[in-house]
Image (cartoon, rainbow, N blue to C red):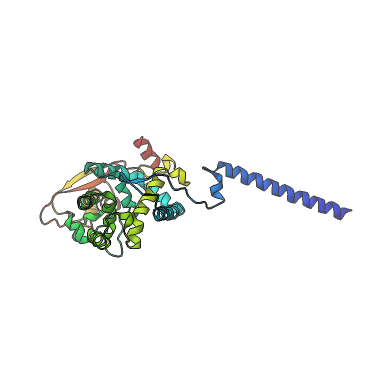
């Protein structure tokens, strides 16, 4: 008898534990943002009925266009950490890109190239391409960037964006459409011209290109879709979690600087901050033999504001 009672009590205890666990997990689930089913299943993503890039229609009625876009949407949606970081960083850099692109009459969709090229960072590729817009040394110089041992303006976010605009305008004038201009940013104008001559078509969507260039436009389109409507793809980032613009002032320098650390101390900031806001300064000195004029970005005091204080200042 006692053994039976023990079994019954054990069964009741197990039942209560299961019931309690289900209650706890259900409570946690309902606190989660978005559609809860996304936390249990990896789901396929809907392809929009219509889509444009830089005002030009994407032919989603073609099966290979839909499938190529589907691939990049899945890759970038389920690569959670990288895409979350891009959403956060875009709030710092996209307003700047938008203003420069508009100034040059270039569609703002081209800001997504900086995500595809560099992840909105001053990175260096294995081929030696540098910065947000990934300029090779020769191309950078062709488009007016100063590149030497002391200064490399490929790391200058404003000047490199201006140079990218000049390149894109040249490409648009050559092709007469923005989609091929974007493709040429990856493959080069010579590479695109060679394939147009070889394949007798001037439509990006009809050209057989290398895998990297073929994916390039679709990666841009995927990031456009996700960043324009992040919650549709399961990304929930509140306003106080994004990376905000940090205000700066410009200090003119038109002579030699023997030690940037001393200069930074005179500006009441650290050497680290000086280089963070001016990564185009490549040494700890500036020879400046020609006495050129440079403008150094100095974060405005209090430069050590907390994230919350920056958000309040922004609002």
Q: Identify the image quadrant of residue 242.
A: top left
What residue lies at 66% left-to-right and 48% top-to-bottom?
21
Whether residue 271 can be seen here: no
Closer to us: 225 or 153: 225
- Residue 54 position, x and y percent, is 30, 45
Direction from residue 147 to residue 74 in the image, left or right: right
Q: Identify the image quadrant of residue 95.
A: top left
What residue lies at 37% left-to-right and 36% top-to-bottom?
312
Query: What is the number of callouts on the image?
Result: 0
Q: Is residue 7 above or below residue 315?
A: below
Direction from residue 22 to residue 314 in the image, left or right: left
Closer to us: 67 or 226: 67
Q: Identify the image quadrant of residue 26.
A: top right
Closer to us: 207 or 299: 207
Q: Residue furthest right?
A: 1
Q: Residue furthest bottom?
A: 126
What residue lies at 50% left-to-right and 51% top-to-bottom?
44
Quadrant location, the C terminus: top left
Whether residue 289 can be seen here: yes
- Residue 183 position, x and y percent, is 29, 55
- Residue 49 position, x and y percent, is 42, 44
Q: Residue furthest front?
A: 200
Q: Residue furthest left?
A: 290
- Residue 143 position, x and y percent, is 18, 54
What residue lies at 87% left-to-right and 53% top-to-bottom?
2
């Amino acid at each position: 008898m006692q053994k039976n009672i023990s079994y019954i009590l054990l069964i009741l205890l197990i039942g209560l534990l299961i019931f309690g666990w289900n209650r706890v997990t259900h409570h946690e689930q309902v606190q989660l943002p978005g559609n809860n089913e996304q936390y249990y299943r990896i789901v396929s993503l809907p392809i929009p009925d219509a889509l444009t890039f830089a005002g030009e229609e994407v032919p989603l009625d073609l099966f290979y266009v839909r499938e190529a876009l589907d691939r990049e949407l899945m890759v970038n949606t389920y690569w959670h950490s990288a895409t979350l970081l891009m959403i956060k960083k875009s709030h710092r850099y996209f307003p700047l890109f938008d203003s420069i692109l508009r100034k040059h009459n270039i569609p703002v969709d081209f800001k997504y190239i900086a995500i595809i090229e560099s992840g909105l960072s001053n990175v260096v590729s294995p081929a030696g391409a540098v910065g947000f817009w990934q300029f090779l040394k020769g191309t950078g110089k062709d488009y007016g960037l100063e590149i030497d041992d002391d200064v490399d303006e490929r790391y200058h976010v404003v000047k490199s964006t201006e140079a990218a605009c000049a390149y894109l305008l040249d490409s648009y004038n050559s092709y007469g459409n923005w989609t091929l201009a974007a493709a040429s940013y990856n493959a080069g104008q010579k590479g695109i011209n060679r394939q147009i001559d070889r394949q007798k078509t001037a439509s990006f969507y009809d050209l057989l290109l290398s895998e990297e260039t073929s994916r390039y436009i679709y990666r841009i389109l995927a990031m456009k879709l996700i960043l324009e409507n992040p919650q549709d793809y399961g990304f929930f980032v509140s306003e106080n979690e994004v990376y905000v613009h940090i205000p700066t002032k410009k200090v003119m320098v038109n002579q030699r600087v023997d030690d940037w650390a001393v200069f930074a101390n005179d500006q009441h900031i650290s050497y680290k901050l000086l280089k963070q806001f001016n990564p185009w300064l490549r040494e700890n000195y500036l020879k400046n033999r020609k006495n050129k004029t440079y403008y150094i970005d100095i974060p405005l005091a209090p430069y050590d504001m907390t994230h919350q204080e920056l958000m309040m200042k922004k609002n």
